[in-house]
Image (cartoon, rainbow, N blue to C red):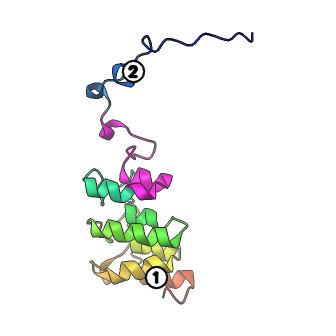
Amino acid sequence: MNEIHPPVPSSKMPSARSRLPFSEAPSISMIKLERGLVQRSLLYSLERGYFSLIRYLLESGTGNARERDSEGRTGLIYCCFIDNDCWAQNIAMTLLEYGAKIDDHDQRGLNALHYAIITQRLILVRRYLDSLDFDLSRSTDIHGNTCLHYACSTGNLEIV
């Protein structure tokens, strides 16, 4: 039971290239995950906390700043759920720099500003309002609620 097996000579061990030739490797766009996220995509990196990879994906042209998951949520919406305010703000600024739009909404009609207000992320609310590229009064969810409705419902006077 406690036998020691001799090592396999390296000449018989197939290399990584011979086991999975790069020409036959699945495309990045074909590796789908549970919520419709593509492995090594921008949203996948956000969800997993690979924050330093996001700028690389955007600079290399691999990442899409306006990418959506299966529920229509964008990277700017995901930023509202990053615990560290500094990381959340820096990633949001990077996404905005590469073409993300605050008014892109999910299936519920909520955009990044709605989510920042709901989660009471004051730093993101300020950032999104500073880089406002849409009509705030026309930004309503599927029930007709505006950002001001959500701000008042939080009871946070700084956000209102």
Which residue is at a point 55% across and 66% down the rendered structure image? Answer: 83
Q: Nearer the viewer, residue 158 or 150?
A: 158
Q: Which residues are magenta?
A: 27-53
Tell me the SS state at disc 1.
helix
Q: Is residue 80 left or right of residue 59?
A: right
Disc 2 marks a residue whose amino acid type is Ser
Q: Give x and y (percent) for residue 90.
A: 41, 70
Q: Nearer the viewer, residue 160 or 61?
A: 61
Establish if 2 lies above or below 99: above
Contact between labelled residues 1 and 2, with CB atoms less than 8 Å apart: no
Residue 43, x across and y down, in percent: 40, 54
Examine the rendering and report whether any part of residue 31 can be seen. Answer: yes
- In the image, taking residue 27 as reference, residue 75 lies left or right, namely right
Confirm whether the magenta stretch covers residue 42: yes
Where is mark 1, residue-wise? Answer: 149
- Residue 43's disc number: none
The residue sitting at 44% across, 79% down in the picture is 125
Which residue, given by chain and number where applicable, does mark 2 sit on? 15
Residue drawn at x 42%, y 82% is 126
> Which mark sits nearer the N-terminus, 2 or 1?
2
Specify the quadrant of the image occupied by residue 98.
bottom left
Return the x and y of residue 5 as percentages of the image width and height. Answer: 63, 10
Amino acid residing under circle 1:
His
